[in-house]
Amino acid sequence: MFQSFDDASEPAAGPARLARLRARLAAEGLDGFLVPRADEHQGEYVPKAAERLAWLTGFTGSAGTCVVLGDEAAVFVDGRYTLQVREQTDGRAFERCHLVDMPPSKWLAGRLKPGQRLGYDPMLHTVAQVRRLEKVCSEAGAEFVAVAENPVDAVWDGRPDLPVGAVQLQPGDLAGASAAEKIARLDAALAKAGVDAAVLTQPDSIAWLFNVRGSDVAHNPVPLAFAILRKGAPPQLFIDGRKLSNAVRSAVADVAEIAEPSGLTPALAALGAKAARVLVDPELTADAIARRITASGGTIVEGQDPVLLPKAVKNAAEIAGTRRAHLRDGAAVTRFLHWLEKTAPAGHLDEIAVAEALERFRAETGALKDISFDTISGAGAHAALPHYRVTRASSAPLKPGEIYLIDSGGQYEDGTTDITRTVIVGEPTAEMRDRFTRVLAGMIAISTARFPVGTSGAQLDPFARMALWKAGLDFDHGTGHGVGVYLSVHEGPQRISKLGTTPFEAGMILSNEPGYYKAGEYGIRIENLLLVTPAEPLAGGERPMHGFETLTFAPIDRRLIEPALLSPADRAWLDGYHAEVMARIGPFVDDETRAWLAAATAPL
């Protein structure tokens, strides 16, 4: 199994570890320290060696920060984790704060005193984050101090080693473009931007650029590495040589200079010595990297990671591979849903057993490399927690009359999947049917949207919410995120959310996942992945338009639908979608599942 259901949280150890850290800070002349949930690459997924926040506080969520002062400490999380942080941290040692209502900058502004020294690890905070916190410290008369060695590491006994997962080459017929072609394209982009170099810190950007994949972090097939793009010269790749076989090293050496990670700092200094203009993404790049460049005489030019947009716009080979992966995955999910409907009423299943079953169905494809994230498997009240992570201690049974939600995905060499289905065990209430149908209407509204070229996710996001808004309801997460191709399941810069400002381009892949959550009772989310495509021109139309192609094929639980709440157009879309599910998935499943699928996809 790819997923562990053990609870790695150690809240009881928090106070003692906090005391040891404070003693270390005092010895180093620091009055406080920031402990983010981050590594040197600023990614969502980090290796065990970088789980400093979890080690110190017990909180194991994917986003958060702890601020430690001499007599106070606080953990800051967003709305996904407000319940989890209370369960996993000791409230006597750590105040729990909502990242939006009380961000670290605001919390610190009310506590820092003139002359105090607040420490931070400059490899674990981005340029933009440091800029904001320096301002807070300055206004309080305090000093924001970059440390050479992380004090958490000094008191963390048994800290894991950094990973050295083997790197593989991504086949050219799946990548759709050679590394040399991608590098040439980016070299032209550097020239156009008027810069001499660009620093890449995102592992998925580097994996895409060099057509490699790795295994350094859970569920993301990427190697941890840094790279420097140089105008008119081969790029430099900084990676632990133990990850590279002779064949991989030879292939990468044809297009890049390879060095150990320790070579990054001298390379940055060399750029500075040449007075180079260096492109740095302030939202993704560690503060230490930018400081090294400027301290050596270079000039920072702030801008977006130049790989993000080319990576987000998939080429023909990546799109074809993604379509294949979704048919394979859809067949596995359909077999699972048939099994679940047969098995759940007996009352012997719990959240872990169901998540493990879905992983087995995916593994039986013979093509599964990994799951694409820890499966969200929530029954009853747990389904109301959008980012619930089941553990052996929390695993709840599936009970008649309750909703069950499963959000999961697979990593295949030709594509990455992400799908959510919400089903009923037994009979739903009228309210459940109402809420499910409103969520479905929002999902259909996004699926069927036509929009002018240049439209961004913030402009489409209300489509997903309108049916809920009409009933005085809403959901607190974004409607959709970008998705990679055998890369990260969460990919930027595209997204469907109130904050999504990147215009959509044909070839981008996004999730479409509106929801509704009734705290303590049930939750609903329906998710398909979509491909941005040019829309067919309409007679009399005056502007070029985009639309979406649905990539995900698996039945939606008809037992939870209230047909009267759907418009005729919505009902037609659902019937058409289900007919396509039957046509595409039917040939890939066994006879018993096919018979069940025919009933599950029958017209409303």
Image (tube, rainbow, N blue to C red):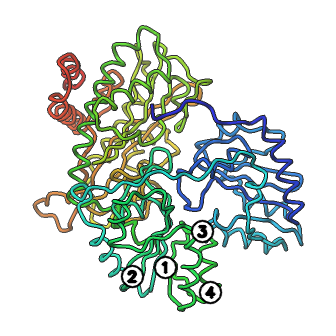
Q: Nearer the viewer, residue 200 or 535?
A: 200
In this rendering, the answer to whether 533 lies above or below 367 is: below
Q: Amino acid at mark 2?
A: Leu
Label 4 vs 1, first from the N-terminus: 1
Q: CA–CA distance between discs 4 and 1? A: 15 Å
Q: CA–CA distance between discs 2 and 4? A: 21 Å
| Res. 600 visible in picture | yes
Label 1 vs 2, first from the N-terminus: 2
Q: CA–CA distance between discs 3 and 2? A: 20 Å
Q: Residues within 10 Å of mark 4 (few under 14, many from 20)?
A: some
Position of 34 with respect to 44 (left or right) is right
Give the structural element (helix, strand or loop) at label 1: strand
Label 3 vs 4, first from the N-terminus: 3
Residue at which label 4 appears: 296
Q: Nearer the viewer, residue 76 or 289?
A: 289
Q: Are marks 2 and 4 in contact (CB under 8 Å)?
A: no
Q: Are marks 4 and 1 in contact (CB under 8 Å)?
A: no
Q: Residue at x 42, y 42 (%)?
A: 372
* Numbered mark located on residue 190 in the image: 2
* Numbered mark located on residue 279 in the image: 1
